[in-house]
């Protein structure tokens, strides 16, 4: 017998079900269609053209990340589907049911380190810092009366962008890059303080 979950909340899949190592989802147009399909799934007699389905044995991984409003299903080389469930309690209930009823699967929980969680904003911070120091050099030179130009006159290259920013003046360059560096630093701190926790179900083939 299938376990079926339904929802009429915006941003949620309207119907999600699990039976015989198979995950189902569907988004019928009306509530009556949802109810009818739910009854059919529970009875084991339904129109398969109206549902998306995949056997857990065909999945590479089923994962749930804390704070994300969906369960991810990965299969094949690039196959990916989401079970969209905004209610946290219900989302974990669905995931735990799939986990408990997926035979011969490897279960794991992976908590990222602070550095791993904040890797992208940290990279952004150092890229912005490098651009800042480069631009600062030309801005200081400009303040001293030394003006640099690109011979081709084309300023759509990285050097041209740096020279263009430097031409704004030293004070504006410092203000602009201070704001960008602060944004990157705040993003890093936020992500590092709350590193994601990933729960995984990896069915064995």
Image (tube, rainbow, N blue to C red):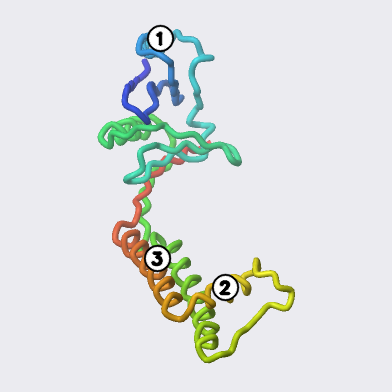
Q: Are marks 3 and 2 in contact (CB under 8 Å)?
A: no
How far across and how far down the image is residue 124, in percent? 47, 66
Query: Which circle's residue, 2 or 1, is located before the other in the chain?
Result: 1
Q: Is residue 162 left or right of residue 3?
A: right
- State the residue in front, 198 or 106: 198
User: With respect to residue 130, does 68 lie above or below?
Assistant: above
Give the CA distance from mark 2 to mark 1.
Answer: 65 Å
Q: Secondary structure at mark 1?
A: helix
Give how far across and how far down residue 139 sits, in percent. 51, 82
The residue pinned by badge 1 equals 40
Q: Secondary structure at mark 3?
A: helix
The single residue placed furthest to the left in the displayed view is 89
At x 39% / y 32%, what residue is drawn?
84
Q: Secondary structure at mark 2?
A: helix
Please say if 92 is above or below 140. Answer: above
At x 47% / y 67%, what residue is drawn? Answer: 123
C-alpha separation, residue under disc 3 versus residue under disc 1: 51 Å
Q: What is the number of the mark on residue 197? A: none
**Residue labelled with disc 3:** 184
Q: Nearer the viewer, residue 151 or 45?
A: 151
User: Label 2: how many residues lie within 10 Å, few (<14), some (14-19) or many (20+)?
Assistant: some
How far apart in space, not on screen, are marks 3 and 2 (Cα)? 22 Å
Question: Is residue 89 shown left or right of residue 121?
Answer: left
Q: Which residue is mark 2?
A: 164
């Amino acid at each position: 017998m299938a376990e079926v979950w339904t929802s009429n909340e915006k941003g949620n899949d309207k119907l999600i079900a699990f039976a015989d190592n198979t995950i189902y989802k569907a988004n019928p147009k009306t509530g009556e269609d949802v109810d009818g399909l739910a009854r059919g799934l529970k009875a084991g007699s339904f129109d398969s053209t109206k549902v998306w389905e995949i056997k857990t044995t065909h999945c590479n991984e089923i994962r749930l990340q804390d704070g994300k409003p969906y369960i991810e299903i990965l299969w094949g080389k690039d196959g990916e589907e989401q079970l969209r469930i905004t209610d946290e309690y219900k989302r974990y209930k669905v995931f735990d049911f799939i986990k408990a009823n997926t035979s011969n699967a490897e279960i794991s929980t992976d908590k990222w380190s602070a550095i791993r969680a904040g890797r992208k904003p940290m990279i952004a911070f150092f890229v912005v810092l490098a651009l800042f120091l480069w631009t600062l050099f030309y801005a200081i030179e400009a303040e001293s009366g030394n003006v640099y130009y690109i011979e081709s006159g084309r300023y759509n290259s990285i050097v041209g962008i740096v020279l263009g920013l430097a031409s704004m003046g030293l004070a504006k360059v410092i203000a602009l890059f201070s704001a960008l560096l602060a944004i990157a630093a705040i993003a890093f701190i936020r992500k590092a303080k709350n590193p994601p926790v990933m729960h995984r179900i990896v069915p064995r083939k």
